[in-house]
Image (tube, rainbow, N blue to C red):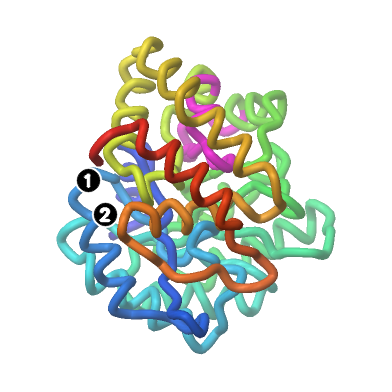
C-alpha cells in the first residue's frame, strides 16, 4: 500500500486500536491476540492500529514488537488493513517503523516521543527522521509532549510526501482549526482524544469526520452504530448513547490516571474476550468498578 492509499483509508470510516493480549504473567499471548483480531475484523473498521495506545505500545519491548505487528498483519491479511504504532526515542521509533514496514503493515501511527519536551525544530527533526526511514505512509499523533504547529507541519509535508495523516489527541479547537486551514486536504485527519465518541460531532464540524474508537474493543456493534450516527447527523442516536453509556463510562474512566486503557481491557474481559492484565505502571480496574462497567455494558444489549 502506498502512502496515498493509506490516506484514503484514513478518511473512509471508523478506525480502532486492538488491545494487545498478555497472559497472567504479563507476557505476549499470541493465540489470544489472533483470536481478538479474528473477532474484530468483520465488524467493519476501515483499519486497525496494531500496538497503538490502547494496545499498550508504551509498555512493549523492542524484541516483542516485530512479532506483534507480524501477527496482526498475517491474521488480518485480506480482511482489514493494519497500521502499526511506533514511537518513543527517535532511533527506537525508526526501528519500529522499519520492522512494521518489513512485516507488511500499511503504515505507521507515530506516537509521541515521551517525557522530554522539545521545540518545534526538534520535533520536526524527529518526525522527518522517521518519515525518511521508510517508504510507506506515516500518520503523526499530535499529543502530550509532541504538539506540532501549522508551519511545522507544512514544512514537514513539503519535505516528506509519505507524511499523509494527522491525528489529534490534544483537543485544542483553535489549534485544530488553524492546522486544517493551513494544510487543507494535504492530510487525512483523525480525531484521537480518549473516548473519541464524545468529541466526534465537534470534530466533524471542523472537517475531521473520522476518529478512532477504543470501545470498539468490547462493544463493536455500538461503536459502529455511533459512528454511523455521526456520519448521518443522527443526533437522536448520538444523544441517547452519550447519555446512557458514554457519559457514565467517562465518569468511571476518569477515576484513575491510565484507566483509559485499563477500562477497555476490563470491558473486553466482561464480554468474554479477555486480553489479560495491563502492564505496570497501569493498574487494572477494582472489582467494584468491574461490576459498574458490567452493568453499563448490559444496557446496550447484544453486540
In the rendering, at what x and y percent does residue 203 appear?
Answer: 53, 25
Image quadrant containing the C terminus? top left
- Residue at 42 percent of width and 23 percent of height: 241
Above or below residue 297? Residue 238 is above
- Numbered disc 1: secondary structure: helix
The stretch in magenta equals: 182-202
Q: Is 86 colored magenta in this rendering?
A: no
Taking depth in this image into account, of 13 and 44 the one nearest to the observer is 44
Dot 1 alpha-carbon crowd within 10 angstroms: few under 14, some 14 to 19, many 20 or more: few
Give the CA separation, mark 1 to mark 2.
6 Å
- Numbered disc 2: secondary structure: helix
Taking depth in this image into account, of 162 and 281 the one nearest to the observer is 281
Badge count: 2
Taking depth in this image into account, of 257 and 204 the one nearest to the observer is 257
In the rendering, at what x and y percent does residue 166 appear?
Answer: 54, 44
Q: Which residue is mark 2?
A: 40
Q: Which mark is residue 43?
A: 1
Quadrant of residue 28 within the rendered picture: bottom left
Instruction: Give the side of residue 126 with respect to residue 184, left or right.
Output: right
Q: Which mark is residue 166?
A: none
In the rendering, at what x and y percent does residue 208 appear?
Answer: 48, 29
Amino acid at each position: 500500500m502506498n502512502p496515498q492509499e493509506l490516506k484514503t483509508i484514513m478518511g473512509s470510516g471508523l478506525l480502532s486500536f486492538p488491545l494487545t493480549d498478555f497472559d497472567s504473567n504479563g507476557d505476549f499471548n499470541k493465540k489470544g491476540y489472533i483470536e481478538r483480531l479474528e473477532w474484530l475484523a468483520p465488524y467493519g473498521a476501515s483499519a486497525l492500529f496494531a500496538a497503538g495506545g490502547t494496545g499498550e505500545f508504551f509498555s512493549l519491548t523492542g524484541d516483542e514488537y516485530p512479532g506483534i505487528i507480524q501477527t496482526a498483519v498475517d491474521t488480518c491479511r485480506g480482511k482489514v488493513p493494519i497500521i502499526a504504532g511506533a514511537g518513543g526515542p527517535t532511533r527506537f521509533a525508526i526501528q519500529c517503523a522499519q520492522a512494521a514496514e518489513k512485516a507488511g503493515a500499511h503504515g505507521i501511527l507515530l506516537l509521541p516521543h515521551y517525557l522530554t519536551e522539545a521545540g518545534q525544530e526538534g520535533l520536526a527533526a524527529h518526525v522527518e527522521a522517521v518519515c525518511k526511514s521508510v517508504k510507506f505512509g506515516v500518520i503523526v499523533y499530535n499529543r502530550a509532549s509532541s504538539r506540532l504547529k501549522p508551519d511545522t507541519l507544512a514544512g514537514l509535508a513539503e519535505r516528506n510526501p509519505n507524511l499523509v495523516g494527522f491525528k489529534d489527541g490534544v483537543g485544542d479547537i483553535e489549534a485544530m482549526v488553524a492546522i486544517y486551514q493551513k494544510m487543507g486536504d494535504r492530510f487525512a485527519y483523525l480525531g484521537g482524544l480518549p473516548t473519541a465518541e464524545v468529541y466526534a460531532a465537534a470534530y466533524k464540524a471542523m472537517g475531521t469526520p473520522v476518529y478512532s474508537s477504543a470501545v470498539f474493543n468490547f462493544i463493536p456493534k455500538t461503536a459502529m452504530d455511533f459512528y454511523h450516527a455521526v456520519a448521518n447527523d443522527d443526533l437522536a442516536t448520538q444523544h441517547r448513547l452519550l447519555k446512557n453509556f458514554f457519559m457514565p463510562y467517562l465518569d468511571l474512566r476518569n477515576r484513575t490516571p491510565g484507566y483509559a486503557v485499563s477500562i477497555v481491557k476490563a470491558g473486553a474481559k466482561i464480554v468474554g474476550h479477555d486480553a489479560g492484565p495491563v502492564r505496570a505502571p497501569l493498574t487494572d480496574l477494582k472489582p467494584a468498578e468491574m461490576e459498574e462497567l458490567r452493568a453499563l455494558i448490559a444496557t446496550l444489549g447484544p453486540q
